[in-house]
Amino acid sequence: MTVWVVRAGKYGELESIALNKNIVLIGWGLKSLSSFKDMKEIKEMLASKYADKSKNSISTIASELWSFAHDIKKGELIVLPRKTNSTIAVGEVIGDYEYRSELEYSHTIPVKWLKTDIPRAHFDPDLLFSFGSLLTVFKVNRENAEERIKALISNTKPNISDDNSDYSADIKQNSEDQILKISDDNSDYFTNIKQYSKDRILTYILRKYKGHKLEKLIEEILKSEGYFTQGSNIGADEGVDILAGSGQFGFSHPNLCIQVKSGNNQVDLATFRSLQGTMKTFNAEHGLLVSLFGFSSAVKKEAKKSFFKIRLWELNDIFEAVLKNYEKFSEDLKTELPLQRIWILSEKEEEI
């Protein structure tokens, strides 16, 4: 059975509509796609409406619109890579294409969302590579894609390969391919190398840093930010993994109490409240709660009430902090987490 990717806006601005209304939706300001007898008519309409676009761009957009209205069938899977967080939503098509004039993006397909927050790092690298295409609507052509995605829906624990030997080669080769391919033909299958690279790093962190190793990574980040830190001994943290303070010897403000969780489950409200109690015990002004697998909705809701005291860090926050501070890391940690910069061409994506 076919797996389709349908995006929700360049910046994820349509995500809430798609998830709340149980649909996927696209735009381009055309009348009902059911009124076009073939793709040629769609191309002609697009060409008259968007005279500034090339023939290849028009052909690409027309193909996506036609696929959206005619090729996506009931029972097939829809993948929606979310841009508002580092997760992916997966749903099942439950109806046919429908033109809904009350919506700004009027072309819709009804979907039953099966899972709306699967971490990107849980997916196999080849699937993530496919999801990175800059197209808005496209078919995923990967072996056993449906079976692997359904396995993630039923069991959210990651199936992460230990084979990272081809990581740098993959990124470099695909970057070179993009640089060598300088043409106006946007109908080809472009891949977002930047997102693919990020996904591979996230997967590496998820696999490599567990327990005390994750604590040491967080402590290294804090040191790079100018904090004086004290980590806990393995097995006896007294409710706190890291204490951090500003200035010489950590005697200045602000000071932090940090708890780090690397288990396979979302952090619950009890853990959040435990950190609040630990902060009082250690007279800490602020707290940082770190979780590789995120936080329950109850924790996120409670954290808003403690905005000026506690911050939540998920996998994506760790990634951003690593990139920001990597050059300041110790040589030992750089050896353990080997990253290097590469230059790639930035492709212009077509949003529909």
Image: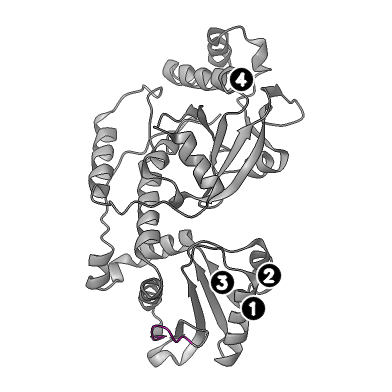
Q: Nearer the viewer, mark 3 or mark 4?
A: 4
Label 1 near label 2: C-beta < 8 Å? yes
- The alpha-carbon separation of the residues under discs 1 and 4 comes to 49 Å
* Left or right: 2 in relation to 271: left
Q: Which badge, 3 or 1, comes first in the chain's sequence?
A: 1
State the SS at label 4. Answer: helix
Q: Nearer the viewer, residue 278 or 182?
A: 278
| Rendered image: mark on residue 302 | 2
What type of secondary structure mainly makes up the magenta span? loop
> Residue at left 45%, top 53%?
158
| Rendered image: mark on residue 273 | 1
State the SS at label 2. Answer: helix
Q: Nearer the viewer, mark 2 or mark 1?
A: 1
Label 1 near label 3: C-beta < 8 Å? no
State the SS at label 3. Answer: strand
- The alpha-carbon separation of the residues under discs 3 and 1 comes to 13 Å
> Residue at left 68%, top 17%?
32
Q: Which badge, 3 or 4, comes first in the chain's sequence?
A: 4
Q: Is residue 172 above or below residue 216?
A: above
- Asked if the stretch drawn in magenta spans residue 231, the answer is yes
* Mark 4 residue crowding within 10 angstroms, few (<14) / some (14–19) / many (20+): some
* Mark 1 residue crowding within 10 angstroms, few (<14) / some (14–19) / many (20+): some
